[in-house]
Amino acid sequence: MSAMNRKHALAVVAGLLAMTVSTVAKPAEYQIAIANMKFGSPPAELHVGDVIVWRNDDIFRHTATARDASFDVDLPPKSQKKMTVERAGAVKFYCRFHPMMTGELNVQP
């Protein structure tokens, strides 16, 4: 391959890589607050790779615990923790200390 053809091939590959990188969505960050013994509404547009910031505004300790055991976030009073969403599908969650507190994440690929 001549030097000119190599340069052209490299330019094409670089262009394709740039297009691929620019079309990949960056992870979004969402917040789910816990207040008055209730989980706030989960985001409607949640995708694998997005980040959820669980924020406990209550004076009681809570958890965000998946029924399928895929996550378990312990939240002391007035604290917050980040969690990266790792798989698609519907995941029901609850608080281990207050089982009447429930919610569901609907995660898209």
Image (cartoon, helix red, strand yellow):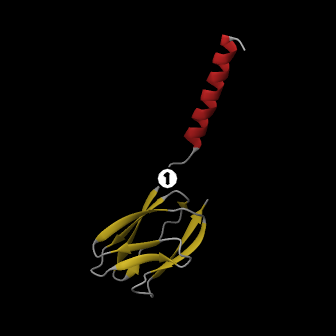
Q: Nearer the viewer, residue 44 or 50?
A: 50
Q: Residue at x 39, y 85 (%)?
A: 97
Q: Locate the N terminus and report the quarter of the image it occupies.
A: top right
Q: Residues within 10 Å of mark 1 (few under 14, many from 20)?
A: some
Q: In the image, what residue occupies the spot 63% across and 32% down? A: 16
Instruction: Decide: is 82 above or below 71.
Output: above
Foreground pick, 4 / 69: 69
Which residue is tagged 1?
Answer: 27
In the rendered image, residue 39, in percent from the top left (x then y), is placed at 41, 77
Q: Going by the image, does 92 lie left or right of 16?
A: left
Q: Residue at x 54, y 48 (%)?
A: 25
Where residue 59 appears, as percent x and y from the top left, is 27, 80
4 vs 103, left or right, is right
Left or right: residue 88 compared with residue 74: right
Where residue 75 sits in the image (x, y, percent)? 35, 74
Amino acid type, mark 1: Pro
Q: Quadrant of the C terminus?
A: bottom right
